[in-house]
Amino acid sequence: MNKKIVLHSLAQIALIEAGLMLLPAAVALYYGETKTLQVFLIVAACVAALQVPIILLTKIKDTDNMNFRDGVAIAVSAWIVISLFGALPFYVSGEIPNFCNAFFESISGFTTTGSSILTDMEALTKGMQFWRCFTHWVGGMGVLVLTVAILPSDKKSSSLQLMRAECPGPTVEKLVPKGKSSALILYVIYAVLTLIMIIFLVFGGMPLYDSVCTAFGTAGTGGFGIKNAGLGFYNSAYIEGVVTVFMIMFGINFNMYYFIVIKRFSDIFKNSELKLYLGTIIVSIGLICANTMAYGVYGSFSKAFRYSSFQVGSIMTSTGFATADFDQWPEFSKVILVLLMFIGACAGSTGGGFKVSRVLILVRTAKRNLRKLLHPKSVNVVKSDDKSLNLETVHGVSGYLIIYILIFFVSLLIISLNNLDFTTSFTSVTTCFNNIGPGLNKVGPMCNFSQLSDLSKYTLSLDMLLGRLECIPVLMMFAPSMWIKKLY
Amino acid sequence: MKFVVIGAGKIGSTLSQQLVEEGHSVIAVDSNSEAVKKLLNSQDIMCIEGNGATADIQVQAGIKGADLLIATTAHDELNMVCCMLGRQLGAKRTICRVRNPEYYDQIDIIKNNLGLALIINPELTTAREIANGLVFPTAAKVEMFGKGKVEMVELKIADDSPLIGLTLAEIYKRLRLKFLICAVQRESGTFIPSGDFVLHAGDRINIAASHSDIERFFRENGLVKNKIKSVMIVGGGKIGYYLAKMLSSMGMRVKVIEKDYTRCTELCDEVPKATIIHGDGTDQELLLDEGIKEVDAFVALSGLDEENIIMSLYAKNNSGAKTITKINRDSYVDMARMLGLDTIVMPKLLTTGTILSYVRSLENASSESRIESLYHIVGNKVEAIEFNIKENIPHLTGIPLKDVRIKKNILICAIIRKRQVIIPNGSDTVELDDSVIIVTKDQRFSELRDILE
């Protein structure tokens, strides 16, 4: 990779982050939290000051081209760098005194996982809580997409290289010919949806500050709450309903919203991923409703529907909010939730997981292979949305499945060193790798990750990063030829 | 502006790259998935895989509301269908590549009935460029402005040239001719020179002047070669055909060497004045037999860049002929220059120049100056643009040029007023109805007023 370009881009991204830190500083100023305000200003100033010499020293010439390798290197290092810098406010202010914990919290925020090591989140200052939720919003649509949208566009194709390394899903498509405009459109859609959600929440009687934080957590499909009791604190069916609907909306491919804007409705109805996504949600809600009622967890249908729909939406989109302690639900419901954790949201959304479109392609590939065995001479193609997929995409998805499973097992092995029970170990990896938040048992919705060892926390942090960037870019960084020119 | 480019071949991809560099949105369509992938990875554009001559794909590419559809697939007929369909589906203008000479007899019917804004023929443009170069054998390249009133020629300063070591101001004083050196290429880069610039041996300079002054410039510097009377062309493809026809009508003796026998018979039929040889141009004995040592010019137009380079080198080393080499790949140009081949033509750059000047004149259609022609003179870095001034431009028209504040790296190199060429100095002015030729480096202009600080 071209280290000069990578360093230059990293410095630019860090500068943007320093700029973003001014927002929580403003919140702290508004609430009169002088100490928090100082922390944010100092950290932002230090981070910014650190970047100036780097930017000056790594001047980019016209001849410097960015290739896919550089894009990947920038994406992965950028996520690590912003998580490190993002942890500084927690650590410097002393609100999370252990650096390992602060880093875990920060990366959990940026990767929109929402797993927390905090036992008492209400103890945080308003400014710090705002930063914690804001990392979800930034991480949701992506740091690099933000960079592409903000920074002056170059004439090369580097924007696509960057977005491809970050955007979830098996294939990346631009909405409009220019990378910068595509990124801007995505962010405008994202911001407008978030704003609508805030309005709905405020309308339901939620305080403005709480609404903004909750909307950030939902939009990024993150799941950090600001109350120890989560959204259950407000005990309002309206608020839960609003959050459910918006969680599901943020789990949909953002291209669909662009199609609505440019009035190409036929493309939305044709989209098989969307159909499968909504279908899975409806079926899961039905099953969990029936199961919980049959075991008498909830007495009435309305109650069962309220809690199950919220939970299914929350888990499937990898948000990870909780209104009920689903650890107390019957096994069948719990298993459904764990399965949903793996499936995840749609490609091109802010959600995590394996992605519905990949599941769709895998199932269709399996079907094709079966038919091939039945009729050995038959010629079949795997189709998605009326378009036949090229073999490379199909192989890519199968390859991704193998990598996904391998990483999962290795992480599980490391976590098992904590000597906790199997459910806890298994679901803690599941939940972090798929960027969800709460797991089951000791890492359940009403507990947190503070009792794990530092090794486990770092492993889970890496899992979150692997999950958010979809494994392959991170693994590419381990290839020696990425680093040593001679091995190209 | 929004562009749809159908066909991501040599011309399509060069064109889309230049359009993106000028800040336009480009959607490329090609049925070859490899070509699509390559383009997507190297340029900031959107690509669609599929047949561009189908309504479905064109609608997907957003043809409705597109400012320009450019069809550059390999087949003329397909291009015409693309353009016809595009017009019906709502493209504002269409540009079509037609290169088969047979269609050129009824080209006006095609253009009017399909509503084409422009027809491009890279082969014809290339042949014209080569023919221009053969008229001025010493110059590497010749561009025409103002309907031939002003010519811009590129030439290499020989090692024993009397101009070496002089500043441009001294040269102008010594030669007492009306000309201007408007761009200098050297290994360390390309310059738009000012009066205190010193020329070195091996520099390639572009000079602008009227035809008679350029002839005099060549004569006084001992650069005149004998007029070219005989030309050997290797490769009887479309460029070869157009070129042979042009040159033989100018009275030159033309010999075309072509590998394919049927093509040879076709050429015999189409260009009766030329001598057609059936044989392999890379066969050196054949070249010797056909008199490469005696010929005045040698033009390598085969389909392979490598063959063209090798043949030209052979011709250069074995005769005093002026060689012209056709090269398609960008990366070979520098290599060929290093080997001493100075006259190189790149069909794709010539064509994209035509389209870009059309695009920019669309952009500035409402303003006070109009683009008449545009050339890329040094690779892709330096542009020469001819503007026609239709209205007064404040701070520019009527003011002596020494008082006009012009941006860096821009030179006003000629003014054409009432069919008279003025090579301007500081006391000249630009007036209404003049044509102004400017040379710029690393900048893009669609309006003349943008050159002001």
Image: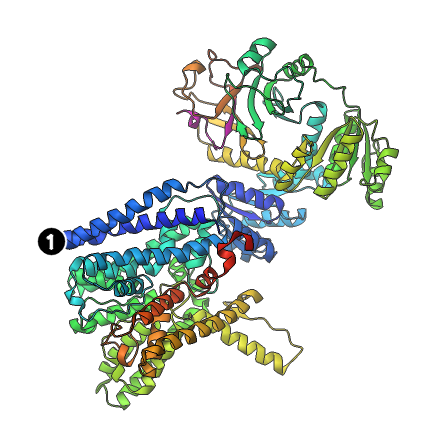
User: What residue lies at 29% left-to-right and 71% top-to-bottom?
Assistant: A320
Q: Residues within 10 Å of mark 1 (few under 14, many from 20)?
A: few
Specify whether B261 is left or right of B329. right
Q: Nearer the viewer, residue A316 or B53?
A: A316
- Residue A190 visible in rendering: yes
Q: Looking at the rendering, in which quadrant would you find the C terminus of chain A?
A: bottom right
- Rendered position, A480 above or below A444: above
**Closer to the camera in the image, A264 or A143:** A143
Please determine whether, in this image, residue A231 is positioned above or below residue B120: below
Q: Position of residue B281 (x, y in %)?
A: 81, 40
Q: Callout 1, which amino acid?
A: Gly
The extreme left residue here reads A32
Dot 1: element:
loop
Name the one closer to the observer, A397 or A360. Answer: A397
Position of residue B390 measured from the top left corner of the image (x, y, whole percent):
47, 23
Count of numbered labels shown in the rendering: 1
Can residue B51 be seen here? The reply is: no
Q: Which residue is mark 1?
A: A32
In the image, is residue B69 part of the stretch drawn in magenta?
A: no
In which quadrant of the rendered view does residue B348 lie? top right
Where residue B101 appears, x then y in whole percent?
Answer: 73, 39
Q: Residue at x 18, y 67 (%)?
A: A121
Q: Position of residue B44 (x, y in %)?
A: 48, 48
B272 left or right, relative to B312 = right
Q: Residue at x 47, y 13 (%)?
A: B426
Residue at point 31% right, 46% down? Answer: A50
In magenta, the rendered stretch is B437-452
Which chain does the numbered disc 1 sit on?
A
B438 drawn magenta: yes
